[in-house]
Amino acid sequence: MAQPTPIGVVLDVGPAVHQTAGLARYAERLASHLLAGHGEEIDLTLFFNRHSGHGLPVSLQNTQTVTVERGQYAWRLGALASQLLRSTRFERSLPPGALYHATEHLLPRLARLTVLTVHDLIFAAYPQHHTYTNRAFLQVAMPLFVRAADAIIAVSQQTRRDLVDRYATPPAKIQVIYEGIDDRFAPIGSDWQSDLRGQYSPDRPYLLMVGTLEPRKNHATAMRALARLKQAGHPQRLLISGGQGWLFEPVRRLVEELGLTGDVTFAGRVPDDDLPALYAGADALLLPSLYEGFGFPVLEAMACGTPVVCSNSSSLPEVAGDAALLVPPTDDEALAAAVERILTEPGLAADLRRRGAIQAARFRWERCAAETVAVYEELIRPRSSGRRFA
């Protein structure tokens, strides 16, 4: 029996070019695993707007790629205008292909089938934590993008629920496909941990937070919990890894108000190669976020053998499973108590490490890529049989 012709897929990898956080990792890892494992099923072309002069990461170079060069705001507003006017003029910018996959929240109107990955609706759940311009754009654009997409990939059940509740998106149109973690996140030898400790926390054990510096990550509750732990006599400092986001100055002032200037280290964005050892050397990872669409640090820490304390809200319970201690996101007393249990109960810490390794192993990029190809096929192949996404 003859093999079906590969599906022509144009994948927008713009986040992997222009960003450094979770969206960048999703676009880069998905593209890498589609290229490595699914060449017989799809004919993949990478696409991005070269508005900043940046190029593809090393892992995606020497790949079939098409680019345009337009200003960032012109590109975003143009995509919105194409939806409002129902104009398919963006087709002139794209290479041939049966299907276009937007990996971030930006979907132009096209004459071909489209897939949209929705990572979260944080701008709607916590509008006060977004800049005005970004919030205004997404409030208008996201409902249009969601409605126009032929199929939607949600990265968690929480995001799927948000799409249904806020936009009345037909549930059958949404496929939940979890993101994954890389093999580099694994228990690290003590020598490497010692080298990193010398760089980031030379004199004391530490607790770790990983993520962009922005209000949604809820560093303020972590600071108050740390103050409680200091009062109880625990020596740990709080090491914070993450690039500068927005609206973060009040948290920096809180550090001074709580008398924690010598107990909190802002490490900036830590190089990717350092992250596994940084996780492995921490006594615990804290992620008291108000809202997460997925929550990479939870799984990365678990894979590195680090106990996790995270929020009991948004997507985090489904990502953490039974392998973390869950607390209300704004309850600093509960957060401090959970951390103290890890620090003082070796049996509990060991059990969390064991369960964490099992939980993290369930989330693989190979699976994410395979399930994404299944979405493509469900859109393209069922035309003859009548099956389609709603």
Image: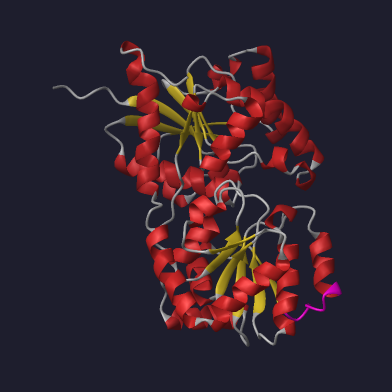
In this picture, which residue range is highlighted in magenta? 257-263
Residue 212, image x, y percentages:
66, 56
Q: Is residue 44 left or right of residue 236?
A: left
Q: Position of residue 266 (x, y in %)?
A: 70, 70
Rendered image quadrant of residue 127: top right
Question: Looking at the image, which is closer to me, 344 or 113?
Answer: 344
Residue 270 versus residue 45: which sits nearer the camera? 270
Q: Is residue 44 above or below residue 211?
A: above
- Horizontal placement of 332 versus 180: left or right? right
Side of 181 relative to 5 (left or right): right
| The N terminus lies in quadrant | top left
Q: Is residue 145 visible?
A: yes
Name the one closer to the observer, 291 or 135: 291
Residue 246 percent location from the top left of the image: 76, 52
Residue 256 in which image quadrant: bottom right
Q: Is residue 94 magenta?
A: no
206 vs 121: above or below: below
**Relative to 344, residue 123 above or below:** above
